[in-house]
C-alpha cells in the first residue's frame, strides 16, 4: 500500500512539474509537448512486447518443450487471477527474466536460458510470481504514463533553454528579466528534466518493491524470491548481459548489466540487499 501511494504521489509531482514548466511557454506548447510525448511513448506501449522480445531474439516456448515451466506459470496465473501469459525463451546465459505486454490479456513472460539453468523450481516460482505481479498491476501502463510525462517535461525544457539563450523569454529588465532572469530560467530548464528522470526512476523502484511483495504472496513463500534474487545478483555479476539495451533494463527482474546499482537514485531497481531484507521480513 505504501509503495502504491508513493507511485501515485510521484506521478502527481511529475504532473505538477509538467504544468508549471508548460506555463512558461503557455498552453499551446504544453499541448504540443504532450502530443509529441504521447505519440512516441504510446506507440511503444502498444507494440512494446513485440519490440522488446524481438530485440532479445526471444522465441515462444511450446508446451512440449518445457511442460514444467508451463505448469508453474499456469498454476501461478490462476492464483494471481490473470490469464496465463505467453512464455518466451531468451538465448542468453545471463540469468534474468522480464514481463511485457500492455495488459493481462496481452502479456508475455520471458526467461533466459541462464535463469532456467541456475534456479530450482521454488526459486523459479518466486521469479515468475514477481513477473506476474507486474502484469497484474499493469506496470507497463504505469511506466508508459510516467515516461510520457517525463518526455513532455524534457521537450518543453529544451524549448525553454533555446528561448532563454536567444532572448525569447526572460529578457525584459523591467519585468525582472535581464541576465539573472535568463540564468534562472536556464537553470530551471536544465534541472526540470533531471528531476523528472529521478522521479521516473523512483516510480520504477517503487513498482519493483510492489512486484516483490505481490510475487511473494502469489507463490506462497517470500523466501522463494529472496533466494532467487540472491542467486541472480551473483549470476548477473558473473555473466552480465552485454547486449542488453539500457532503455529496457527496467523490465528485467534484476539490472542486466551488473545486478547492483552504484548510485541508487539513478537506478531502475532498488538495491538487491534491501529487496531480500524486505522479503525475509515478510516471514517474521
Image (cartoon, rainbow, N blue to C red):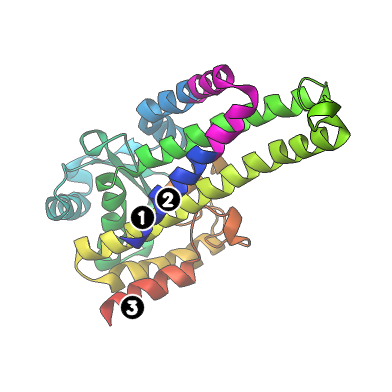
Residue occupying the point 49% across, 19% down: 35
**Total numbered circles:** 3
In the rendered image, which quarter contains the N terminus?
bottom left
Q: Secondary structure at mark 1?
A: helix
x, y percent for residue 243: 56, 43
| Spatial CA span between label 1 and label 3 | 21 Å
Mark 3 or mark 2: which is in front?
Answer: 2
In the rendered image, residue 56 lying in the magenta stretch gets the answer: no
The chief SS type of the magenta part is helix
Q: Residue furthest front?
A: 174
Specify the quadrant of the image occupied by residue 83: top left
Category of crowding for the residue at label 3, using alpha-carbon neighbours closer than 10 angstroms: few (below 14), some (14–19), many (at least 20): few
Rendered view: 184 above or below 224? above
Q: Residue 107: horizontal and vertical position, in percent?
A: 27, 38
User: Which stretch appears magenta?
Assistant: 17-37
Seen in the picture, residue 64 relative to 262 is either above or below; the reply is: above
Instruction: Return the residue at label 1.
Output: 5
The tag earlier along the polypeptide, 1 or 3, is: 1
Amino acid at each position: 500500500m505504501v509503495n502504491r501511494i508513493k507511485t501515485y504521489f510521484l506521478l502527481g509531482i511529475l504532473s505538477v512539474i509538467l504544468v508549471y514548466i508548460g506555463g512558461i511557454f503557455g498552453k499551446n506548447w504544453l499541448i504540443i509537448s504532450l502530443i509529441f510525448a504521447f505519440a512516441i511513448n504510446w506507440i511503444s506501449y502498444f507494440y512494446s512486447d513485440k519490440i522488446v522480445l524481438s530485440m532479445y531474439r526471444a522465441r515462444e516456448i511450446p508446451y512440449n518443450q518445457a511442460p514444467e515451466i508451463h505448469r508453474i506459470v499456469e498454476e501461478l496465473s490462476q492464483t494471481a487471477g490473470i490469464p496465463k501469459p505467453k512464455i518466451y525463451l531468451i538465448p542468453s546465459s545471463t540469468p534474468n527474466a522480464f514481463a511485457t505486454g500492455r495488459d493481462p490479456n496481452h502479456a508475455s513472460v520471458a526467461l533466459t536460458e541462464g535463469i532456467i539453468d541456475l534456479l530450482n523450481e521454488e526459486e523459479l516460482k518466486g521469479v515468475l510470481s514477481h513477473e506476474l505481479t507486474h502484469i497484474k498491476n499493469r506496470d507497463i501502463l504505469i511506466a508508459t504514463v510516467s515516461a510520457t510525462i517525463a518526455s513532455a517535461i524534457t521537450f518543453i525544457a529544451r524549448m525553454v533553454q533555446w528561448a532563454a539563450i536567444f532572448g525569447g523569454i526572460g529578457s525584459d529588465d523591467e519585468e525582472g528579466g535581464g541576465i539573472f532572469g535568463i540564468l534562472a530560467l536556464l537553470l530551471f530548464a536544465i534541472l526540470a528534466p533531471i528531476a523528472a528522470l529521478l522521479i521516473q526512476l523512483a516510480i520504477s523502484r517503487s513498482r519493483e518493491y510492489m512486484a516483490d511483495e505481490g510475487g511473494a504472496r502469489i507463490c506462497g513463500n517470500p523466501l522463494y524470491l529472496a533466494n532467487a534474487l540472491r542467486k541472480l545478483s551473483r549470476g548477473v555479476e558473473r555473466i552480465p548481459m552485454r547486449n542488453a539495451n539500457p532503455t529496457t533494463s527496467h523490465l528485467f527482474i534484476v539490472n542486466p548489466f551488473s545486478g547492483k546499482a552504484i548510485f541508487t537514485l539513478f537506478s531502475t531497481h532498488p538495491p538487491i540487499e534491501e529487496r531480500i531484507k524486505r522479503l525475509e521480513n515478510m516471514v517474521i
